Amino acid sequence: MSFWDHLDALRGVLVKIAVVLVAVAMVLFALMPRIFDGIILAPCRGDFILYRVFEGITAAIPGLPQFSTTGFHVDLINIQLASQFFIHMSTSFYLALVLSFPVVVYLLWTFVAPALYQHEKRGVKVAFVMGNVMFFLGVAVGYLVVFPVTLRFLADYHVSAMVPNQISLDSYMDTFMMLIFVMGVIFEMPLLSWLLGRVGVLHRGFFARYRRHAVVVLLILAAFITPTGDPFTLTIVFLPIYLLYEFSAWLVPAARDKAGD
């Protein structure tokens, strides 16, 4: 195929991707009021599933600070005239991109695949499935754990009792999208480790050698994601990230014996 033939094929793939995204975004746009009330704004209410789980755990284990769902509620305000309309549109697009992610990657793969040799295609199916599963798992952890814990802490935090919190819709959505996306990316760590292990860059000894360093770094990352001094909530965020580290170590091959190691 000539350069222009490749360009024409790429254009066809991009058109298909655009059609998929627009179609899904239109459906989400129509359903967005229900999605906002039932999903996106659910962590604003005291009866959110994570809060009820925390309340049950702290009530059952003596010595832990008691977590209460009673009276917790976050009221959002809109301070710009067009914000609600643009957030309605942008959220529809971002959610369409997230939900259509497997289809988008598959369509891009159909463009790249003909140029690869058979041995270069090995492991692509595993990487495709693993990447999608881990991304959506990270999104779920971000929505069900990381964002609610962060919201609960920041919504109740006051530098002074004279300064009430009035959280804008823009601020809420920026934090919501950022934390969920970050967790989705973090959960791709095992896939990245697996790929680097296949090309010989990473081996299991690396994870064993730097495990103590990794624990410190991951604790700092967990503290940054959830800026709270409560060891219980810090552990809730740290544990899945650390398990990702161990899972990544398990995926890569053991180091081959080398002189000087």
Image (cartoon, rainbow, N blue to C red):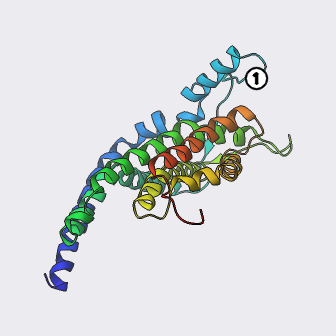
On screen, 196 above or below 39?
Answer: below
Q: Nearer the viewer, residue 88 or 113?
A: 113
The amino acid type, in three-letter code, at marker 1 is Leu
Q: Nearer the viewer, residue 160 or 203?
A: 203
Task: Measuring from the top left, give residue 17's x and y in whole percent.
Answer: 26, 61
Q: Nearer the viewer, residue 261 or 91?
A: 261
The residue that appears at 47% across and 50% down in the rendered structure is 190
Circle 1 SS class: loop
Residue closest to the far bottom: 3
Judged left or right of residue 228, residue 90 is: left
Task: Measuring from the top left, give residue 97's x and y in whole percent.
Answer: 37, 55
Residue 134 shows up from this direction: yes
Task: Measuring from the top left, give residue 252's x and y in whole percent.
Answer: 46, 52
Mark 1 Cα shell of 10 Å, populated few (<14), some (14-19), many (≥20):
few
Judged left or right of residue 195, residue 183 is: right
Instruction: Kindly identify which residue carries mark 1.
Output: 64
The quarter in which the N terminus is drawn is bottom left
The residue that appears at 60% across and 66% down in the rendered structure is 260
Q: Quadrant of residue 11?
A: bottom left
Q: Quadrant of residue 59?
A: top right
The quarter in which the C terminus is drawn is bottom right
Residue closest to the far front: 259
Residue 41 shows up from this direction: no
On screen, 240 above or below 55?
Answer: below
